[in-house]
Image (cartoon, rainbow, N blue to C red):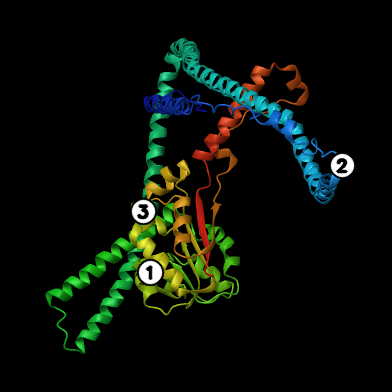
Amino acid sequence: MLNRPLTVDDRARLKQEREDADRAYNDALTALDGAVQRLREMPHPPPSYDEHQITPLNEQWDLLQARPTSQPGWRGRVRSLIWRVVAPLFERQQTFNSAIVDHINRNVAMHREFTKALASTIGLVRDELEQLVHFENRLIQYAQQITPYVDTKDRDVTRLIVEVAGSVSAVSDEFSKRWESNFARERRYELRVEDLRASFGVVHQATQMLKRELGRLQEVGLAAATSDVDVSAPHHRQSTGDVLNHALNSYKYVGFENHYRGSTDDIRERLATYLPRFDGAADVLDVGCGRGEFLDLLRERGVAARGIDTNHEMVQVCRERGLAADEGDALSYLRGIPDASLGGLFAAQVVEHLEPGYLLNLLDAAFLKLRPGATLVLETINVASWSAFFHSYIRDLTHIRPLHPDTLQYFVTASGFQNVRVEYRSPLPASAKLERLPAPDKGAALKTPPAPVNLMLAFNHNVEKLNGLRFADQDYAGIGERR
């Protein structure tokens, strides 16, 4: 809260904040309106139970109604003899027929009630959906009334502010001018200090790079002095210039990583949770090793590992820390080593820098080079989270293609890896998410009319949906095993 009069810059800033808030509110309202469900066509109830053959079955199941009567003479004796032979068969058949007909008769009523219950359930579901759509429409209408309500309050507050400001303006003008002057001077000083700090960091990186490159050029000059190589040849000068330009761009990206991704300690803390997956492994490859945080963690855990990175400056940082790292292309490196020679492969924040075709070839090569039982871990930005996409992903100009978790999981599986799963990481704190309305206690809930309670529950449900879309975990890891 400001303990001074508002300046012109303050008013401009507050106006911009209000416009931004209005824009965000309108965007959210539009998204909410687009999420309102539309009532769909419900399925028809099934036809009634087929009872066409029930009556004939009840009339014809008794096979022994026409038992043969005893007759005199040899024909009667023959008929009686034959009947004694076949009667047991007919009796067993009649017993079976009786059981079948009884079972069917017992299920007729159940089938009738089932059809009625299903038709009633479909009707009930349709009614509930209609009520839900009606509620969502009413919720949209409620949200649309917030803006005019707030505007009326703003007008009252503005009127009071104008009246109060007019009554004290004569006293506060001189003080306001002095305060603005001092504040502006202090702010300019702070900005200059911040700029100097940032510039010093960049200069430090550039100095370290130039010292390394000058040392390398001295070695090249000494080698040329003892050989027949013409160091003044145009192609040699161009090669040296390309090396310097590449190194210059490399140190710029190192500075970018230091500024936005976090300090070495922060990255070590985040990556340490992957270490148990590589316990007992050897010859682990860290693709895109960067400043070597994970290589350092593996070394402390006693796991032999090597890094590969295209950034010359980052490879130099790794080597200065005594870590094994090579400068080069990961796919070319994998194709140049024997099959089944790696005990694990790790890549953090790398796959989003790769073209789709390159990524698929890298996964195929990794499958061939990993030993049975080895683990593949690919961490990247969770672009399904709006906050991660619009902050972390698009901020880095070296990112080429966003990778949805489902996409990465599918292609890791398609490359032959098994037990493939996605683990979400880097959750945002609760303070960064939308807040739910507090639930009333049991006694208050009983006294509250159902409409406000239902509105609160619906609001909290929608808050959970928005938090799941906008404020989901910032990263995820695609993990697979080579069987």
What is the number of the mark on residue 330? Answer: 1
Please indicate whether residue 310 sits to the left or right of residue 435 in the image: left
Measure the alpha-carbon separation of dots 1 and 2.
Answer: 106 Å
Q: Amino acid at mark 1?
A: Ala
Measure the alpha-carbon separation of dots 3 and 1.
Answer: 17 Å
The quadrant the C terminus occupies is bottom right
The residue closer to the viewer here, 12 or 382, is 382
Q: Which residue is mark 2?
A: 72
Disc 2 element? loop
Look at the image and tell me whether residue 151 can be seen: yes
Residue 191 placement: quadrant: top left
Q: Return the x and y of residue 332 as percentages of the image width and height.
A: 34, 72
Earlier residue among tags 1 and 2: 2
What is the number of the mark on residue 399? Answer: 3
Disc 1 element? helix
Q: What residue is shown at x 79% (from left), y 45% (from top)? A: 90
